[in-house]
Image (cartoon, grey):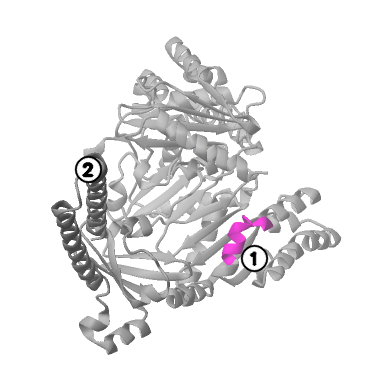
């Protein structure tokens, strides 16, 4: 409408200018007297003016088409009282009219394009939404467009927003704090030292909570309950849970290994639900090694913050003995046992399965190892070399055979993994009633099944270590051939990168035990040796490097080269052997459609946290991720961003 109006105006100006020129020419150049021509021009001008006035009047009438004209005076007042505004547009999305509410708020927008004024309304016009929200000056509006109509309704919802914000801020958040290793640390300490630990660590937590107005109550010596609201919770998130760091520092000053595990549950109005959520989240924070916060928001996945110190060896042998006992009872109550590994079984997974198979045999219960899908390359080579020996001693089952073995009393043991999606045969988990998990990976999701027994130790080097450790607690002596012991020891060598990472005193104890069974480190080393081609490929991978602060390096392969998953993790392992390299990431295509990232750290950088930001998983010192339908470059750019963010946070 405004455009048309402008066009007419321009036209009139043009005619007037032409007229003036014609008049000037006729009078001074052609020396014509004022006569018929002048007279005609005056008439034409008058007609034009009349047309213009007519047009303007019509335009004006349309512009001031107020609600009162359509619906009467009462409606106008009702709209003002209810804070509802109207706005009309033409087919070019130009605003042609605004109602009183918007007019009284001095929005001078008639003639502007609606999307230039309020870009938030865009979804209304490409049918992505029926209602949008927009903030204009201090007012918040809900804006609705009637299906393909030229009228927009504005509802002022400022007050509602303020009220709902306030009620959100007041929503209850339930929290738990657990002092990791507190019992173990204080058990044999003198009274005086316990008092010192309490004043430096426990008191710090009380002070921290009191300063922030959080209700805190001791539940047990090593556990406290927190009650707070969303506003206080958000403040804590902003401070990145500074208490973790305070306790970590106090702890290292006192030379003790006490850290905090914290959990929060939010976004539910049901207290029993909050309690259940917070307990579950705390178990997760602890099973990931402590020194971190797990936050469970109702209806969402658990997210984690913190986690800066690697799990110290804090497991007690008592736990191993209790687990051995519990597992023994479970085995004895079962008709048969199935052992299930992860996809592309590696030496640790296979070694653990074989040792467990021996333990079950000693109890006189039938046991089978599920063999489905491909094995990891090196394991596959070694296994095929020794295949006959293994087939003589153990019962391996393929997919179809597996199902015929399942009954109500079948026990399924998942080794070296704990997520259904990583299992070689995930549907087994739905068919078996009794499931037990033995793993050394950090837990980052709830189980999708219901396990009877979970034995997870992030401080253990490998699953083989966890299972071989149970051998001395068995009633009968466990038989094992030198070859089986070799495979088990190779599993430990693989997961510890030859005793370099995550190796504790108990790792060596298990290695010594395996040695007694005839394991030979030279043979094991041979299984892990790489062939020449691999060596060349790995060297190539390492050539294309980018260095970041704090000794972080990222290597990547060109998009046209496909490398195995094992190979990129080995390349990352090799990189962290270099001086000054604290953490290494290697990116490459691992299949036609999948890009893989392998991350390794030597203990000062938590690569798990970084990989988790990109929805990967793993450990403090070793993590990985796979991305479908992506290019190496895309993943590289994303990783670069996440690393920069991480560096900015860690000061
Ligand atoms: Mn493992």
Closer to the camera in the image, 71 or 203? 71
Please name the predominant secondary structure of the magenta segment in the image. helix
Q: Is residue 234 magenta?
A: yes
Residue 48 as seen in the image, left or right of residue 351? left
Q: Secondary structure at mark 1?
A: strand
**x, y percent for residue 237:** 58, 59
Look at the picture and state if 86 lies above or below 419.
Answer: below
**x, y percent for residue 94:** 27, 59
Task: Name the N-terminal-most of marks 2 and 1.
Answer: 2
Q: Which residue is mark 2?
A: 31
Residue 41, by quadrant, is bottom left
Look at the picture and state if 302 lies above or below 480.
Answer: below
- The CA distance from mark 2 to mark 1 is 109 Å
Closer to the camera in the image, 366 or 289? 289
Closer to the camera in the image, 85 or 202? 85
Dot 1: within a 10 Å radius of its alpha carbon, few (fewer than 14), some, or many (20 or more) residues? some
Look at the picture and state if 178 lies above or below 317.
Answer: below
Q: Is residue 395 visible?
A: yes
Disc on res. 223: 1
Q: Is residue 607 visible?
A: no
Residue under the point 66% across and 23% down: 579
Q: Quadrant of the C terminus?
A: top right
Q: Secondary structure at mark 2?
A: loop
Residue under the point 38% across and 70% down: 141
Q: Nearer the viewer, mark 2 or mark 1?
A: 2
Q: Which residues are magenta?
A: 233-243
**x, y percent for residue 557:** 43, 22
Label pair 2/1, CB-CB below 8 angstroms:
no
């Amino acid at each position: 409408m405004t455009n048309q109006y402008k066009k007419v105006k321009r036209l009139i100006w043009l005619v007037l200018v032409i007229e003036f020129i014609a008049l000037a020419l006729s009078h001074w150049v052609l020396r014509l007297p004022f006569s018929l021509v002048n007279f005609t021009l005056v008439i034409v001008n008058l007609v034009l003016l009349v047309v213009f006035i007519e047009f303007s009047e019509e335009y004006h009438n349309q512009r001031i088409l107020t609600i009162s004209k359509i619906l009467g005076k009462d409606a106008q007042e009702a709209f003002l009282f209810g804070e509802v505004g109207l706005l009309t547009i033409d087919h070019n999305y130009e605003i042609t009219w605004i109602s009183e509410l918007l007019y009284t708020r001095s929005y001078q927008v008639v003639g502007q394009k609606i999307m230039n004024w309020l870009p938030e309304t865009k979804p209304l016009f490409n049918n992505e939404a029926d209602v949008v929200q927009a903030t204009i000056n201090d007012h918040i509006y809900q804006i609705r467009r009637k299906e393909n109509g030229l009228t927009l309704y504005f509802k002022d919802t400022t007050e509602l927003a303020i009220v709902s914000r306030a009620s959100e801020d007041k929503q209850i958040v339930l929290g738990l704090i657990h002092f990791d290793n507190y019992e173990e640390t204080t058990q044999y300490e003198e009274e005086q030292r316990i008092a010192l630990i309490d004043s430096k660590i426990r008191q710090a937590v009380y002070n921290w909570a009191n300063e922030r107005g959080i209700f805190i109550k001791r539940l047990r010596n090593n556990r406290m309950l927190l009650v707070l609201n969303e506003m206080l919770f958000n403040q804590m998130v902003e401070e990145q849970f500074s208490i973790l760091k305070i306790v970590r520092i106090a702890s290292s000053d006192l030379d003790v290994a006490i850290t905090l595990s914290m959990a929060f549950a939010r976004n539910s109005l049901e207290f029993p639900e909050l309690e259940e959520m917070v307990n579950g989240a705390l178990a997760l924070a602890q099973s990931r090694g402590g020194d971190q916060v797990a936050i469970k928001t109702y209806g969402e996945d658990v997210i984690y913050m913190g986690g800066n110190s690697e799990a110290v060896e804090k497991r007690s042998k008592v736990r191993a003995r209790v687990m051995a006992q519990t597992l023994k009872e479970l085995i004895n109550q079962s008709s048969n046992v199935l052992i299930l590994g992860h996809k592309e079984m590696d030496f640790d997974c296979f070694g653990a399965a074989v040792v467990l198979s021996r333990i079950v045999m000693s109890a006189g219960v039938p046991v089978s190892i599920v063999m489905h899908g491909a094995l990891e390359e090196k394991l596959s080579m070694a296994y095929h070399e020794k295949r006959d020996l293994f087939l003589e001693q153990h019962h391996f089952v393929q997919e179809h055979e597996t199902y015929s073995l399942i009954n109500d009393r079948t026990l399924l043991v998942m080794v070296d993994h704990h997520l259904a999606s990583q299992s070689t045969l995930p549907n087994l988990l739905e068919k078996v009633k009794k499931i037990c998990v033995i793993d050394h990976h950090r837990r980052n999701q709830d189980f999708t099944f219901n396990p009877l027994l979970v034995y997870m130790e992030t401080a253990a080097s490998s699953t083989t270590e966890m299972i071989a450790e149970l051998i001395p607690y068995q009633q009968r002596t466990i038989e094992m051939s030198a070859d089986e012991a070799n495979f088990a020891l190779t599993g430990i060598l693989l997961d510890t990168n030859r005793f370099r990472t995550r190796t504790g005193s108990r790792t060596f104890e298990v290695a010594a035990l395996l040695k007694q069974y005839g394991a030979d480190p030279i043979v094991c080393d041979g299984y892990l040796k790489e062939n020449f081609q691999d060596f060349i490929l790995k060297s190539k991978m390492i050539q294309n490097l980018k260095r970041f602060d704090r000794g972080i390096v990222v290597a990547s392969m060109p998009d046209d080269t496909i490398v195995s998953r094992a190979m990129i993790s080995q390349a990352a392992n090799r990189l962290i052997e270099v001086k000054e390299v604290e953490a290494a990431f290697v990116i490459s295509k691992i299949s036609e459609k999948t890009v893989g990232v392998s991350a390794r750290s030597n203990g000062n950088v938590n690569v798990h946290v970084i990989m988790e930001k990109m929805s990967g998983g793993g450990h403090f010192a070793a993590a990985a991720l796979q991305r479908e339908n992506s290019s190496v470059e895309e993943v590289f750019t994303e990783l670069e961003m996440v690393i920069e963010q991480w560096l900015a946070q860690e000061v």
